[in-house]
Image (cartoon, rainbow, N blue to C red):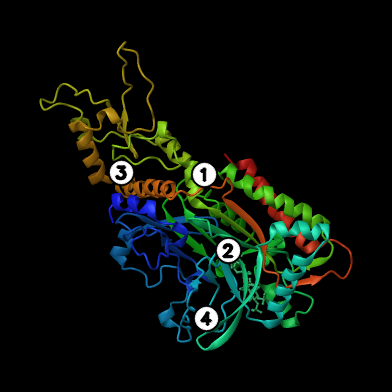
Amino acid sequence: MSLLNSINLGHLIDKKKIDPAKNPNFPLIQAGSREENMGKSEVQFIPIHHRPEPNSSMCHVQPATCKSSSLQQYLANGFPKNPAGPEEKNEEDNDEAEKPSEIPEGYEKFNHQMAGHLSGNNIGMLKRDGLVLKPIIKRECGDREINFYEQLGRTTDKTMTEMKNFVAKFYGTRRLSVEGETRDFIALEDLVEDFKEPCIMDIKIGRRTWDPDATLEKIRSEERKYQDCKRDLGFCIPGFQVYKLSNNQLVKQGKEFGKSLNKEGAEDAIKTFLNANECNDATAKPCRCLIVQFLAILWRILYWARNQRQYRFYSTSILLAYDARRLREKTKPTPSSSPSSTTSTPSPQSKSDYKFTRKGSLYRPMSLAVLNKNNEGNDRIPTGFSGQLTKEGPILNPQRSSTGAKQPIDVHPIVPSILSDNTWSKSMTSLKRTHSFQNNYDKDVQNRKQNYLHLLDELCDERKSSHWAVVKMIDFAHVFPAENSDVDENYLAGIESLVRVFEELLMESD
Ligand SMILES: Nc1ncnc2c1ncn2[C@@H]1O[C@H](COP(=O)(O)OP(=O)(O)OP(=O)(O)O)[C@@H](O)[C@H]1O
Ligand SMILES: O=P(O)(O)O[C@@H]1[C@H](O)[C@H](O)[C@@H](OP(=O)(O)O)[C@H](OP(=O)(O)O)[C@H]1O
């Protein structure tokens, strides 16, 4: 589909109604299968029409380190059967792997489930009309959760009324027939429905994740899980996904990854989730605007938890979510500092890219020095090219104004628009493509796609909310009435710790 066609289409469509499955040409993100979402770690590309170009790097994010491997490596060594890493089971190798059931008509698979149960039919959460349907697997857990939502709906208590702000809206239950069997679901507001590139993290709060009815066996099994993280932070991370701004990949990490994290690993995972832990930039900083949106709600939840004495919130989670599309806009260079749109030069995507452009080490390949001379090899063609290159491209000479005064160098436009039509510029462009300084071609294509997506957003006439981050309390399957009128220390300690992590990130933020 050409850019033009896509833009024309943009006038006509209500994107909320677009089903990527039914519109394979529409460049929306294809999320992983339900099995991939559950407890598995994998990297997915944001597929916009095509498979990854050669040279585009794949990057599995690990707690403290980040390794990248190029497609060429895979070409040399063969593609791994399962690129998700050693913790994954390959379905082919697993005789007991259940096949996903048929989705009831009118419903869709909910692709953004970071943790939690599948039903007996291997059905996870479903979605329809702005709601998510959570399957009820264990009757007593389901009843407890429904009961809690109903109590919350009826409450007149001030503290519990305040809590309604932190909880997804509850729309009762639904009974569906799945492959001939009746299944019950809890219907909730879909918290990520409006996000184009939803980054989501499930953070389970509390050192103690078992409720007063737990058997000894259940207590033991809960105590074995996420040990370091729960001990040191008072919370753990069963799963998350992030659309990486640096390379447009969707990275998902599941519970096995979460269980491997210690305090530092978990803090690192949160940075990764915030797009503040770039593979090739140790100085990447969290976006202040994003941290503030999260903290604004987390502080309110903290305040609420300091007052709340009626319930014990065992094994509930905080769901953090934001739209990477909006974060990308925040980190996008302003039009005045971007390269001319007529050039094919990639625009830097983040502040870290600018830093790299400014500070990147310089080198002078001989072939380019020759390019800077005319055919006789003597006089320089006034191209503006200084003869120096960074990994991002050539550095330009300061331009002279009509009065002869030096103009400041714009560090961003590698090839300025006034040069974009001349032969030198064209040869530079083709040289950049063939030599591919740091995969410029891939980046170029990706930037064009991003620009196109921004344009499409505008054309689709959606009024943008000033908030593009969500914090909600979820999963009330183990909420019990308090036996005394103390605060819920277990929950409070987890929230305090989470707030502390985000406050530290605020200090680091740009
Ligand atoms: N209202 C919602 N909107 C969007 N996503 C949601 C919503 N509620 C839950 N989710 C997603 O579904 C996942 C599982 O939800 P939840 O924790 O309620 O299920 P569960 O089966 O009780 O999980 P667990 O096994 O951890 O007890 C969450 O991690 C989150 O990604
Ligand atoms: O992070 P993991 O390893 O997925 O751990 C699961 C998680 O703690 C669930 O909340 C829990 O379900 P409940 O809420 O029903 O207790 C489930 O217990 P289960 O194994 O007893 O189902 C655990 O296995």
Q: Given the image, on which type of amino acid does mark 1 rest? A: Ala
Q: Give 320 or 451, whichever is nearer the viewer.
A: 451
Q: Residue at x 39, y 46 (%)?
A: 455
The quarter of the image that holds ligand 2 is bottom right
Q: Secondary structure at mark 3?
A: helix
Q: Given the image, on which type of amino acid does mark 3 rest? A: Phe
**If you read the primary sequence from the N terminus, does the residue marked by circle 4 or circle 3 appear first?**
4
Q: Secondary structure at mark 2?
A: loop
Q: In x, y percent, where is residue 484?
A: 89, 67
Q: Is 281 positioned to the left or the right of 258 in the image?
A: left
Q: Is 108 positioned to the left or the right of 71 in the image?
A: right
Crowd band around label 4 with a 10 angstrom C-alpha radius: few (<14), some (14–19), many (20+): some
Q: Give 77 or 110, whichever is nearer the viewer.
A: 110
Q: Which residue is mark 1?
A: 284
Residue 263 image-quadrant placement: bottom right
Question: How far apart are the alpha carbons under marks 1 and 3?
Answer: 21 Å
Q: Nearer the viewer, mark 2 or mark 3?
A: 2
Query: Is there CB contact under 8 Å for labels 2 and 3?
Result: no
Question: How far apart are the alpha carbons under marks 4 and 3?
Answer: 46 Å
Question: How far apart are the alpha carbons under marks 1 and 2?
Answer: 31 Å
Q: Secondary structure at mark 4?
A: loop
Q: Which residue is mark 2?
A: 190
Q: Given the image, on which type of amino acid does mark 4 rest? A: Asn
Q: Which residue is mark 4?
A: 122
Mark 3 vs ligand 1: CB below 8 Å: no
Mark linked to residue 437: 3
